[in-house]
Amino acid sequence: MAGENAVRLRPPRNAVDRRAVGWWSARCLLAAGLPAAVLAVLGLLIEPARTWLLGPAVVLVALGVACTAFFPAWWFRVHRWEVTDEAVYVRTGALWQEWRIAPMSRIQTVDTVRGPLEQLFGLATVTVTTASSKGALRVEGLDHELAADLAERLTALTRATPGDAT
């Protein structure tokens, strides 16, 4: 696309909601804490296997705390999103950063999801589905009202955008 309306890769302008750091932290702690708790309980109940169960539980807790201390703040600095009249831009990732663009003419569905932890933090995720083999674009960590407004805006923009004939 050589025209001035060409969609091109560029950094999205909007950061996710600051509460996403707490949401990501809770997810990290749960991901490490639940298996660690199971191992710890089993270690206390099964004396012959105590060392083999409590050791990995301690390692999981240490990894969970380390990940929680490091990754959520980093993800907050990296995750960006933006919606223009032409496209949805998303940048995600920590070690492997992914930048994606979904032109309005390629959007098939727009969904808003609020899992239990997201509800606790007042957040939501907007999922933009296209025909791409790479899968849907996800804008995570948005204020739930902003997510609802964004889904409504995307639906209106998509409806008003003529289909891509290519």
Image (spheres, rainbow, N blue to C red):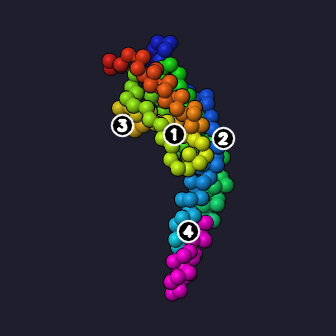
CA separation in Å, label 2 and label 1: 14 Å
Q: Which mark is residue 27?
A: none
Q: Residue furthest top?
A: 3
Q: Main secondary structure of the magenta part?
A: helix
Q: Which mark is residue 36?
A: 4
Which secondary structure, mark 2? Answer: loop
Look at 40% across and 20% down and name the residue there.
159
Asked whether the beta carbons under mark 4 and mark 1 sit within 8 Å of each other, the answer is no
Look at 63% across and 38% down and name the residue there.
17
Which secondary structure, mark 3? Answer: loop
**First along the sequence among labels 2 and 4:** 2
Q: Nearer the viewer, mark 3 or mark 2?
A: 2
CA separation in Å, label 3 and label 2: 31 Å
Q: Which residues are magenta?
A: 40-61
**First along the sequence among labels 2 and 1:** 2
With 134 as the anchor, is 20 left or right in this view? right
Look at 36% across and 37% down and name the residue there.
133
Which secondary structure, mark 4? Answer: helix
Look at 58% across and 56% down and name the residue there.
28
Name the residue that disc number 2 marks: 18
**First along the sequence among labels 1 and 3:** 1
Name the residue that disc number 1 marks: 125
With 54 as the anchor, is 135 left or right in this view? left
Kindly identify the amino acid type of the residue bearing the numbered disc 1: Thr
Q: Nearer the viewer, mark 4 or mark 1?
A: 1
**First along the sequence among labels 4 and 3:** 4
Name the residue that disc number 3 marks: 133
Kindly identify the amino acid type of the residue bearing the numbered disc 2: Arg
